[in-house]
Amino acid sequence: ISALYDKKKEFTFKADRAMKASEKVIDIAVQKSEAAIRKHQNKKTGIEVGRKVHWFERFHWFITREGLLVLSGRDAQQNELLVKRYLRKSHGDLYVHADLHGAATC
């Protein structure tokens, strides 16, 4: 009978050690997964939202000190597009052309 009690005591001790070891392994796995989640979330926040591209950004453009938008085409086709589609006398738009050799006009 004492041999049975000794075996029971031994198995209980082994079971306790196994439980402690499995708890330790689970804690390590949880820490690793939380670290992976944090790393992945940091990657997501690193992406910046792009700004809205304005319609005039496909042309040469700048804004004057007075706050006026100045546009010019990159080639003759874009100049013609600017004049025909976007230039409006009712808005006070102006058209300026350089009278030089090689200057594109509409």
Image (cartoon, rainbow, N blue to C red):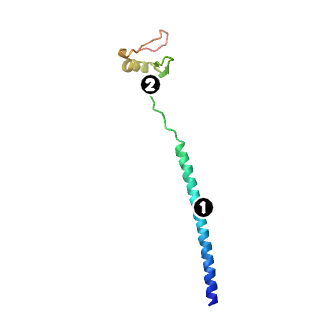
Above or below for 59 versus 105: below
The residue tagged 2 is: 56
**Residue sitting at the far left:** 90
What kind of residue is marked 1? Ile
Q: Earlier in the sequence, mark 2 or mark 1?
A: 1
Determine whether the residue tagged by mark 2 lies in a helix, strand or loop. Answer: helix
Instruction: Determine the CA span between mark 2 and mark 1.
Output: 56 Å
What kind of residue is marked 2? Phe
Q: Is residue 3 left or right of residue 98?
A: right
Quadrant of residue 106 within the rendered picture: top left
Residue 104 place in picture, x, y as percent = 46, 15
* Quadrant in which the N terminus appears: bottom right
Quadrant of residue 86 within the rendered picture: top left
Q: What residue is drawn where x is 61% and y is 80%?
A: 11
The residue tagged 1 is: 28
Disc 2 crowd, CA 10 A, few/some/many (<14, 14-19, 20+): some
